[in-house]
């Protein structure tokens, strides 16, 4: 503290300590806040094809095309410790081959201070819905759920699920030709 | 810094940056209080406005305020200079004194 450099060094180091303490208190002030929200999901007109899955072992797999409707308002999830939300729609089902399959059909990133209302009507899936095998024919219990990652400014990555789901029933036969 | 100052031209040399020990104590207390108070205010303001940037700007302002008050060697940091003994001449052996006891209030 005898010279200007010594005082500047001390002040800067103490400022960094105060910054880290305030950031930690910011994290503590938000860990118990609820991060779910109600969502409305529906899907219609599922069509099945059997195609060769070139990304996998080259055998034929089931491919689904359907029409999705997603409505959600996630504004209640945002607080001063949330940087952005990574929202994704998952099709969950179990087959004889795998106990749990989860296929991401659609996703979106919403930053803080962006529009937080999601209205998607009659959209096709953003990513191909390809099954691991041929077990989707006549599957009556494919559940669509909307989940999100809460990406914080300080702290750990939290995962939450929207309240609301939809069950899709797959058709009993394949279609030929284009989707 | 004082070594750098000795190599400057003479009209610039009075700008030394030392402060005495009591002044150092005062300086340390001043910036600690300023920064902690701004940290608390920043947390409350950020929580109320739900924006972390408000907290960061408040702490940054506290940092600049502390720098302004503590970094330059203001006169109120030099109110208690050390009371050095006058220069002794070397010829009288009995008057060899030990160095005066410094108030070792280093950080």
Image (tube, coloured by chain):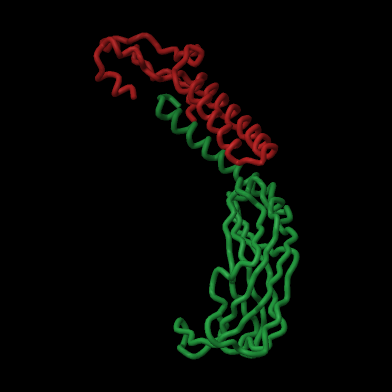
The residue sitting at 66% across, 34% down in the picture is B45
The residue sitting at 69% across, 64% down in the picture is A161
Above or below residue B11? Residue A63 is below
Q: At which x and y percent is residue A20?
A: 56, 43
Above or below residue B75? Residue A159 is below
Viewer-side residue, B98 vs A70: A70
Using residue B4 as the reference point, say whether residue A42 is left or right of it. Answer: right
Using residue B65 as the reference point, say whether residue B11 is left or right of it. Answer: left
Using the rendered view, name the quadrant where residue B92 is placed: top left
Q: At which x and y percent is residue B52?
A: 60, 41
Viewer-side residue, A153 vs B98: A153
Viewer-side residue, A56 vs A2: A56
Viewer-side residue, A125 vs A9: A125
Quadrant position of the N terminus of chain B in the picture: top left
Above or below residue B63? Residue A101 is below
Figure disc tally: 0
Above or below residue B55? Residue B71 is above
Q: At which x and y percent is residue A168?
A: 70, 78
The residue sitting at 64% across, 88% down in the picture is A137
Colour chosen for chain A = green
- Chain seen in red: B
Q: At which x and y percent is residue A163?
A: 75, 64
């Amino acid at each position: 503290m005898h010279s200007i450099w010594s005082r500047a060094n001390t002040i800067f180091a103490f400022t960094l300590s105060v910054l880290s303490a305030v950031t930690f208190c910011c994290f503590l002030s938000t860990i118990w806040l609820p991060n779910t929200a109600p969502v409305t999901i529906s899907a219609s007109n599922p069509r099945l094809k059997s195609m060769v899955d070139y990304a996998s072992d080259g055998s034929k797999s089931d491919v689904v095309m359907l029409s999705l409707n997603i409505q959600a308002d996630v504004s209640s999830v945002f607080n001063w410790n949330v940087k952005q939300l990574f929202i994704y729609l998952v099709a969950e089902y179990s087959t004889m081959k795998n106990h749990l399959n989860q296929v991401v059909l659609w996703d979106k990133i919403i930053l803080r201070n962006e529009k937080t209302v999601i209205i998607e009507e009659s959209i096709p899936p953003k990513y191909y819905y390809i099954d691991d095998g041929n077990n989707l024919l006549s599957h009556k219990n494919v559940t669509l759920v909307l989940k999100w990652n809460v990406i914080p400014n300080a702290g750990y990555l939290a995962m939450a699920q929207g309240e609301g789901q939809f069950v899709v029933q797959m058709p009993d036969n394949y279609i030929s030709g284009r989707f | 810094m004082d070594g750098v100052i000795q190599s400057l031209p003479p009209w610039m040399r009075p700008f030394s940056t030392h402060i005495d020990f009591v002044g150092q104590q005062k300086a340390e207390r001043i910036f600690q209080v300023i920064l902690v108070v701004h940290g608390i205010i920043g947390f409350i303001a950020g929580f109320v406005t739900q924006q972390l940037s408000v907290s960061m700007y408040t702490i940054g302002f506290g940092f600049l305020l502390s720098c302004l008050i503590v970094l330059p060697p203001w006169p109120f940091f030099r109110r208690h200079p050390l009371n050095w003994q006058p220069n002794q001449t070397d010829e009288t052996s009995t008057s060899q004194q030990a160095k005066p006891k410094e108030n070792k209030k280093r950080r």
